[in-house]
Amino acid sequence: MGLDSRAFRDALGQFSTGVCVVTVVDEEMGPIGMTVNSFSAVSLAPPLVLWSIQKDSERFTPFYDSVGFAVSILSEDQAAMSNRYAQKQNYHLEEDSFHLGCSGEAVLKHCLGSFECKTRERIEAGDHIILIGEVVEMQCDSGARPLLFFGGEYRQLR
């Protein structure tokens, strides 16, 4: 007997997460991004992080094929940015919303923190691929509050 996928998704929604936008600079499409909440730390030595992408995502190929990526952690005032890059067919980065980091990856401006990574592993896991990146550059701005996601909607720290 299998689990009901909607019930499973609702149960997962009881775990609060931060919200990130993962970006790559694709040779054909230019800088693109997608909203994720699957971001996690893996290792301190070496510094590794992970995120996952659904295999049937329209953005799968450029992210899977990229040699690197950047993860930008969103602040509570960036919900509109999260919504934009969560939409299908709306993945090109707005011209003034990012800068190219030291690694050459697109890093979103005004975010809480960012990690520029070189793709180290791609692991098949059900209907997703887990991408593990080695962090080569990072920045942190602890002055703002994070954008959180819980129970299917954005939340704020109190």
Image: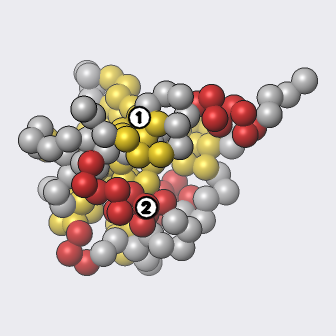
Q: Earlier in the sequence, mark 2 or mark 1?
A: 1
Secondary structure of the residue carrying tag 2 is helix
At 61% across and 59% down in the image, what residue appears?
Answer: 57
Residue 104's x, y, as percent? 23, 61
Q: Three-letter amino acid code at disc 2?
A: Asn
Residue 127's x, y, as percent? 69, 43
Q: Is 115 situated above or below 15?
A: below
Task: Estimate the spatial distance between the alpha carbons at disc 2 and disc 1, rounded to whole Å.
Answer: 15 Å
The image quarter containing residue 16 is top left
In this rendered view, identify the residue nearer to me: 81 or 134: 81
Q: Residue furthest front?
A: 158
Residue 43's x, y, as percent? 33, 23
Disc sitting over residue 47 in the figure:
none
In this rendered view, identify the residue nearer to me: 105 or 87: 87
Residue 120 visible (yes or no): no
Residue 44's x, y, as percent? 26, 22
Local packing at callout 2 (Cα closer than 10 Å; few below 14, some 14-19, many 20+) is: few
In this rendered view, identify the residue nearer to me: 129 or 75: 75
Q: Quadrant of the N terminus?
A: top right
Disc sitting over residue 83 in the figure:
2
Q: Is 80 situated above or below 4?
A: below
Q: Which residue is mark 1?
A: 17
At 24% across and 32% down in the image, what residue appears?
Answer: 158
Name the side, left or right, on which 71 lies relative to 120: left
Q: Three-letter amino acid code at disc 1?
A: Thr
